[in-house]
Image (cartoon, rainbow, N blue to C red):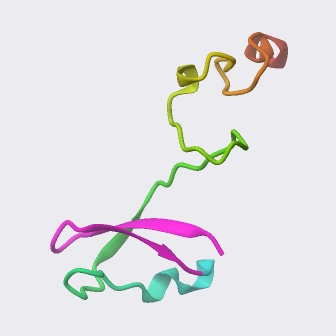
Amino acid sequence: MPIFDFQCADCGHHFDALIRNDEKKNIHCTNCNSVNVKQKLSLFNTSGNGRFSNDAHSHEHSGCCGCNARNSCEMAR
């Protein structure tokens, strides 16, 4: 099951939930129990090392596309 990020429109609380995609319509705020919640865009890890990073330049081997090949973006064009 995926982890989805949400924000409550009533109290502003940010939270995540491990739920099936079809359960998103039944989500309640974990702070105030409101049903007025919006799904946020979630980042995901593709590095395979189990560590989260949203900065492609944080690893010395990362290319501009986040892979090991420095010229991978040029090759994709």
Q: Residue at x 53, y 23 (%)?
A: 58
Towards the viewer: 52 or 72: 52
Label count reads: 0
* Residue 76 shown left or right of residue 15 in the figure: right
Specify the quadrant that holds the N terminus.
bottom right
x and y percentages locating residue 43 in the rendered image? 52, 49
Q: Residue furthest left?
A: 11
Residue 77, placed above or below residue 32: above
Give the residues drawn in magenta, as a range.
Answer: 1-19
Q: Residue furthest right?
A: 75
* Residue 30 shown left or right of residue 27 in the figure: left
Specify the quadrant that holds the C terminus.
top right
Report which quarter residue 49 is drawn in: top right
Towards the viewer: 24 or 18: 18
Towards the viewer: 42 or 56: 56
Q: Residue at x 77, y 10 (%)?
A: 71
Residue 37, placed above or below residue 72: below
x and y percentages locating residue 55 in the rendered image? 50, 28
x and y percentages locating residue 22 in the rendered image? 60, 84
* Residue 45 shown left or right of residue 36 in the figure: right
Q: Residue at x 67, y 27 (%)?
A: 66
Residue 71, placed above or below residue 5: above
Residue 23 magenta-drawn? no
Residue 51, placed above or below residue 76: below
x and y percentages locating residue 47 in the rendered image? 69, 39
* Residue 16 shown left or right of residue 44 in the figure: left
Q: Residue at x 82, y 19 (%)?
A: 76
